[in-house]
């Protein structure tokens, strides 16, 4: 098997798109700006909360038991973006999104009560402002 390594990848005519040939032989044009994740964050949710590692996360706020805000370093262009969140606890719900933050990230126990999870992760795809 061959290995391809590069420091730069760009389209022939446009630096923000690239043509990709699929297994079926069809070629599609992929917009690199849209497919690159704009945010991810891994933080502890019990004891003293803290961001463990992140991209485009400037700070974290504990708004109460199982209730967190994650502020972005660079804002999103609007509040209509895809946000995926998870926890080591029973579950997590994202109730409110804003251009500058994930406004309400709530840890949910199996019985429906709110709980602090030991850690949370978030990931966002969408357009930056």
Image (cartoon, rainbow, N blue to C red):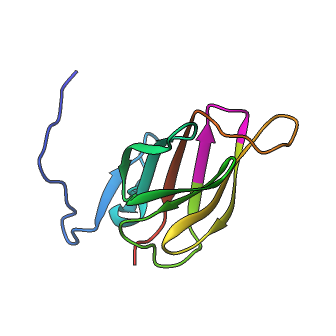
Image point (51%, 67%), residue name: 101
92 on left or right of 41: right
| Left or right placement of residue 97 versus residue 48 in this view | right
Q: Nearer the viewer, residue 74 or 69?
A: 69
Residue furthest out toward the top: 1
Q: Quadrant of residue 33?
A: bottom left
- Is residue 16 depicted above or below 52 in this figure? below
Residue situated in front as seen by the camera: 10 or 104: 104
- Is residue 16 inside the magenta stretch? no
Q: How many marks can you see?
A: 0
Where residue 60 appears, as percent x and y from the top left, is 48, 56
Residue farthest toward the left in the current orientation of the protein: 7
Q: Quadrant of the N terminus?
A: top left
Residue extending farthest to the front is: 47
Percent x, y of residue 90 = 73, 33
Span highlighted in magenta in the image: 84-91
Which quadrant: the C terminus? bottom left
Is residue 27 at all visible to an observer of this figure? yes
- Height in image: 69 above or below 48? below
User: Relative to 46, is 93 on the left or the right?
Assistant: right
Q: Is residue 88 on the magenta stretch?
A: yes
Residue 9 placement: quadrant? bottom left
- Residue 38 visible: no
Give the main secondary structure of the magenta stretch.
strand
Residue 72 place in picture, x, y as percent: 42, 65
In percent of width and height, residue 55 lies at 35, 53
The structure residue drawn at horizontal position 48% and vertical position 42%, both measured from the top left corner, is: 43
Between 116 and 37, the one lying in front of the other is 116
Q: Residue at x 44, y 71 (%)?
A: 127
Q: On screen, 45 above or below 105?
A: above
């Amino acid at each position: 098997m061959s290995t391809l390594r590069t420091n730069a990848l760009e389209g022939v005519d446009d630096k923000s798109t690239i043509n990709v040939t699929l297994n079926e032989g069809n070629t599609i044009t992929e917009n690199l700006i849209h497919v690159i994740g704009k945010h991810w964050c891994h933080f502890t949710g019990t004891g003293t909360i803290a961001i463990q590692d992140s991209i485009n996360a400037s700070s974290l706020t504990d708004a109460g038991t199982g209730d967190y805000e994650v502020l972005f370093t660079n804002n999103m262009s609007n509040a209509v973006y895809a946000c995926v969140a998870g926890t080591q606890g029973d579950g997590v719900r994202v109730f409110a999104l804003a251009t500058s933050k994930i406004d309400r990230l709530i840890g949910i126990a199996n019985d429906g009560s709110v709980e602090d999870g030991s850690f949370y992760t978030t990931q966002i795809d969408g357009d930056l402002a």
